[in-house]
Amino acid sequence: MKKQFSVAIIGCGSRGALFAELMLKMDGAYKISALCDICAEQIEKTKDLLSLRDTEDFTDVEGFFEKKRADVLVIASHDREHVPQALRGLELGYDILLEKPISDSREELSALLEAQKKSGRTVIVCHELRYGKAYMKCEEILRSGILGRLYMIDASERPVYWHWAQSYVRGVGASLKLGHPAILAKCSHDLNLVQNFADSECDTVSSVGGLDFFKPENAPEGAADRCLDCKHVDTCPYSAKRIYIDMWHKAGEPEFVWPYNKVTLAIPNTEQSLMEGIRTGEYGRCAFKCPVEKVDNQMVQMTFKNGVRASLKMAYASEVGRRIVFYCTHGEMVFEDRTRSIEVRRFGEPVEVIDTRALTNGSGVGHGGGDKEIIREFYEILCGERRPSTDLKESIECHLMGVAAEESRALGGALVKVHS
Ligand SMILES: NC(=O)c1ccc[n+]([C@@H]2O[C@H](COP(=O)([O-])OP(=O)(O)OC[C@H]3O[C@@H](n4cnc5c(N)ncnc54)[C@H](O)[C@@H]3O)[C@@H](O)[C@H]2O)c1
């Protein structure tokens, strides 16, 4: 019979509930046995959504950590809880699926690696893009050598403007008390991808960036504190009514999906519950008047020990989609998420265009199928059938690149060694 692993989840918000859902879809591979969240409503939501009846539930985090509750711990709480909870989890002997970002502190990163080594347990960080088939295809082409030697990477992470406002302006992601700097919170995936493509340890980093736009002086003239009270409610691109009501109607009034399920936990979402959410909750505040503690744009330049150079731009944009250009000695490759394509341009040869829709495991849901894949691979690791595609040491390495980027930014763009 197939081996089954019991799972405890701490942090039952969007990500915690998604992991539970994906785990339950794996035909008895996992059983959700404990849920912990400081917000009882999030636990109830997760149980309702997934018809969970026999879980142990905790709003008291200390009580949850009194003893081991399952084979596996999924940590999907807010950023700053990740390492403290992972350390407690390792002490109890859990294998852990840990949401990114891990930490913005060199000390915490090395403490986690030490604890993981000492415990002998598995800790997988959710860099699900590494499991996305389109990114894997880019890696395969680079490694095949048909483009010659890679010497430069130019990557851009372009979350759509309303996603940026939701996650890093209006939501908890705007706070540095609960969250890590944007370059880690939004781009630890990109740093991880770039490092993997470069195939070498990162040596130096420099970075500039700032909070330039989401400030009171950039609010439309006469803007109110809340969108529903504002004369710009039907024209401002950041109007909560346009994002969470008009867009929800256009999307076919889905029952309970991101981004609308951030605004209200009422299942199913209705116009009335969404309206109530933006009338009273954080996502209905004027995007220009929120207490934002993070940058809204940043650039990072990296040099790798094997001579590869890379840049990464983090910018809110009109349409979601990463773009990565790879410059090689005998050709060029352009990954473009918006057009779902990879262009392979060998010098002097016709351009080959790969349609990446054909590569996404039949599921665009959750980072091009990456979320589903990470859950599947985690199971195989737990069964001892394989090693991780990206292990904790590698995840920590790309976080150190982000830490160095923040150190550089604070120094006005100075060159910083990743390993100081
Ligand atoms: N891998 C990815 O691509 C990806 C995508 C989105 C978010 N994330 C990360 O996943 C984490 C969760 O994000 P989310 O979007 O689900 O946020 P969320 O706010 O929807 O969920 C977080 C949950 O954690 C709970 N919580 C906060 N502090 C806690 C504590 N001390 N103990 C237990 N529960 C606690 C909150 O009540 C909330 O329900 C964040 O760290 C975020 O950066 C990763």
Image (cartoon, rainbow, N blue to C red):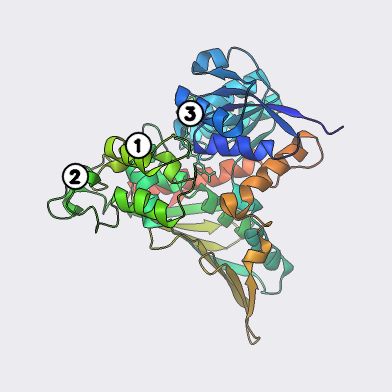
The amino acid marked with disc number 3 is Gln
Residue hosting label 1: 175
For label 3, being within 8 Å of ligand 1 is answered: yes
Circle 1: element type: loop
Q: Is residue 169 visible?
A: yes
On screen, residue 165 above or below 115 = below
The amino acid marked with disc number 1 is Ser
- Depth check: 377 or 418 in front? 377
Residue hosting label 3: 42
Q: Residues within 10 Å of mark 2 (few under 14, many from 20)?
A: some
Q: x, y percentage for residue 348?
A: 64, 87
Q: Residues within 10 Å of mark 1 (few under 14, many from 20)?
A: some
For label 1, being within 8 Å of ligand 1 is answered: no
Q: x, y percentage for residue 346?
A: 64, 80
How many marks overall?
A: 3
Circle 2: element type: helix
User: CA–CA distance between discs 1 and 2?
Assistant: 25 Å
User: CA–CA distance between discs 3 and 1?
Assistant: 20 Å
Q: Earlier in the sequence, mark 3 or mark 1?
A: 3
Residue hosting label 2: 229
Q: x, y percentage for residue 401?
A: 50, 48
Pair 3/1: label in front: 3
The amino acid marked with disc number 2 is Asp
Q: x, y percentage for residue 398?
A: 55, 47
Name the mark on residue 107: none
- Give left or right: position of 314 versus 356: left
Circle 3: element type: helix
